[in-house]
Amino acid sequence: MPDQRETVQVLQLRNAINAGAGWFIWVAGLSMVNSIVSVSGGGFRFIFGLGATQVVDALAHRAGQSGIALDLIINGLLAGLFVLFWNFARKGQKWAFIIGMTLYAFDGLILIPFADYLGLAFHAYVLWRIYGGFNAASQVETLQPAMLAAGGEINPR
């Protein structure tokens, strides 16, 4: 049986995994809120959203009324992708962290031509927080053989 210290460490790592993965949900949700606000003519947006959805929103405004449905579909698919990353990342799947962080980093680069440096800075902050979850998942992966050998179980859910 693993000692109490190892069990506490794994629980702390699981919390860190969930905290890092949770940013994918925030990005997805706030991106959709941004899109809905944009198509309804609102004048604000959340900076944690995706830069790609802002581009889609701008193109939809140019297309007029017919672009609104397409805007919500495309942005819904983009947000859905981040929901998938959240789902797998919270289970400790490192590939979801890696691909999600990579796409979010490229998304941040979209903001540079628009001189949205505040959005870029928040992208960097979110990436740092997501990386914390990735790092925790890596540590759990390292601890897993020892925990299993001691009769413990690591279940990252």
Image (tube, helix red, strand yellow):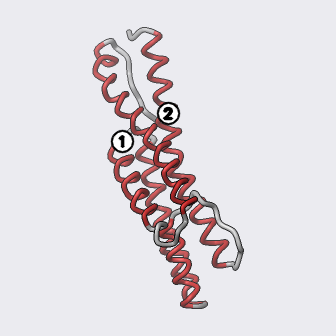
Q: Are marks 2 and 1 in contact (CB under 8 Å)?
A: no
Q: Relative to residue 135, is residue 65 drawn left or right? A: right
Q: How many marks?
A: 2
Nearer to the camera, 113 or 150: 113
Q: Residues within 10 Å of mark 2 (few under 14, many from 20)?
A: many
Q: Secondary structure at mark 1?
A: loop
Question: Image height check: is 98 above or below 32?
Answer: above
Could you say which disc has been placed on residue 142 in the image? none
Could you say which disc has been placed on residue 93 in the image? 1
Question: Image height check: is 81 above or below 14?
Answer: below
Q: Residue at x 50, y 75 (%)?
A: 55
Q: Residue at x 37, y 17 (%)?
A: 152
Q: Give how far across and how far down residue 73 sits, in percent.
A: 51, 75
Mark 2 sits on what residue? 16
Q: Give how far across and how far down residue 47 sits, in percent.
A: 60, 60
Q: Residues within 10 Å of mark 1 (few under 14, many from 20)?
A: many
Q: Nearer the viewer, mark 2 or mark 1?
A: 2
Q: Residue at x 41, y 46 (%)?
A: 88
